[in-house]
Amino acid sequence: MLGAARQLSPELAARALDTAAARARVDIAGSFPDPTVRVMSDEMPRSSGPRENMMIYSFEQEIPLWGRRDLRRQVARAEVDQMTAQVQAADAELVEKVKVAFARYYTSHQAVRRASDQHRAIHGVAEAARERYALGRGEQQEVFRAEIEATLVAAEILRLEASLRSARGQLNALLNRPADATLAAPERLRPLPDARALDVTRLLERARAASPTLAADAAAISAAETNRALTERNWYPDVTVGAAAIDRGSYGPTGYQAWIGMKVPLQWGLRDAQAREAGAQASAARARLEAREQQIRGDLADAVAGAEGSRRTMDLIRRQLVPQAEALVRAGTAGYGLGRVDLATVLRAQHDLIGYRLQLLSAEFDGQRQMAAIERLVGGDL
């Protein structure tokens, strides 16, 4: 499923093309600027006589010096590294969305099944109430009460089915399929990791080593630092070399010209401003990296606490509340058939049981959501 989502994702395809364009800019950055070719018509210098024409054909090339081409290539390579990391970050976000969408699809599917089981159980209670009333052992009010409870559960099933359709549509959208496309019934969720795998310090070390967002920020720092070094070279001028041939036709021999020129860095304020801009961009890139680390540290702490809380909640509901509620339902149903327990107690026990089961599914979904967030932050599966 993850492979299909990656292959069909238009966002990942667009980012891959952006990265390919950035790789092409590496060659562009190291290239010489285009030369200038001039064809000029002029008059030959004469003190008397008729004016005679001559043609001048010139070629001029600007040559970057002081390592500017290498620095431009380094900036372009850093931009490639940044875009590559951004592609990995987008991939991690897509994987997180797919994991969360599948968890929602699974829990919604299970919720409909649990509610349907509960609906059949309450129908059984309603049948028992009708039998008791037919035998003169119960009241008609009990029959109505049981049927109302069955109708309420049916309404809850409709709400859960709508949630299931929404979850199916969301998952299909991530797979670039029609919203109503058929999906196989989900089998199981991934098990949550134990407490030893959720150590915040170790997870933060993994994030520093493998997080694509931190890698993108680090590449941005490299690009900004290199760009600052490139800006400092603006104080040193490039040179322009040129050559020309003079065609005098039948009025004289062919002549030649050659020259070298350079731009004089007289705009001191401009270059000071460029240097300040480059320095500020480099400092901003470092600050963004620190802010990103701080955010990841806080997000990890929050997600780890949430996952641990979900795991404990699941254990409590699964091992204690659900078995106790099931035992209470069995005892209440049997007691009602024998006239030892009133209908309100049986219906309350049924209501509590479905409530605990739905709470368990909610805790399972929340645990899966927190685990997916942690895996996105650290840059890999736990």
Image: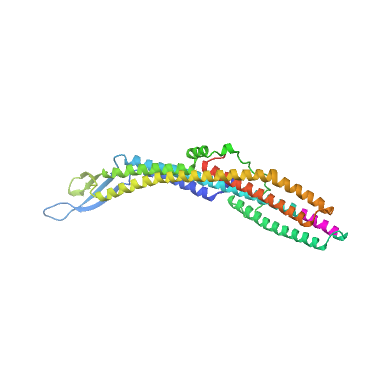
The magenta span reads 121-132
The answer to if 123 sits in the magenta stretch is yes
Q: Would residue 7 be visible to someone looking at this image?
A: no
Residue 152: x, y in percent?
72, 59
Quarter occupied by the C terminus: top right
In this view, the residue farthest toward the front is 340
Secondary structure mostly seen in the magenta stretch: helix
> Residue placed at 74% from the left, 60% from the top?
151
Q: How many marks?
A: 0
The answer to if 358 sits in the magenta stretch is no
Residue 270: x, y in percent?
27, 50
Q: Quadrant of residue 195?
A: top right
Q: Tell me: 317 left or right of 381.
A: right
Quarter occupied by the N terminus: top right
Colour scheme used in the picture? Answer: rainbow
> Residue placed at 43% from the left, 42% from the top?
218
In this view, the residue farthest toward the right is 135
Residue 145: x, y in percent?
77, 61
In this view, the residue farthest toward the left is 48
Along the line of sight, which residue is nearer the eye, 42 or 212? Answer: 212
> Residue placed at 72% from the left, 54% from the top?
351
Along the line of sight, which residue is nearer the eye, 283 or 303? Answer: 303
Q: Tell me: 141 left or right of 58.
A: right
Q: Would residue 17 be visible to someone looking at this image?
A: yes
Q: Tell me: 44 left or right of 280.
A: left
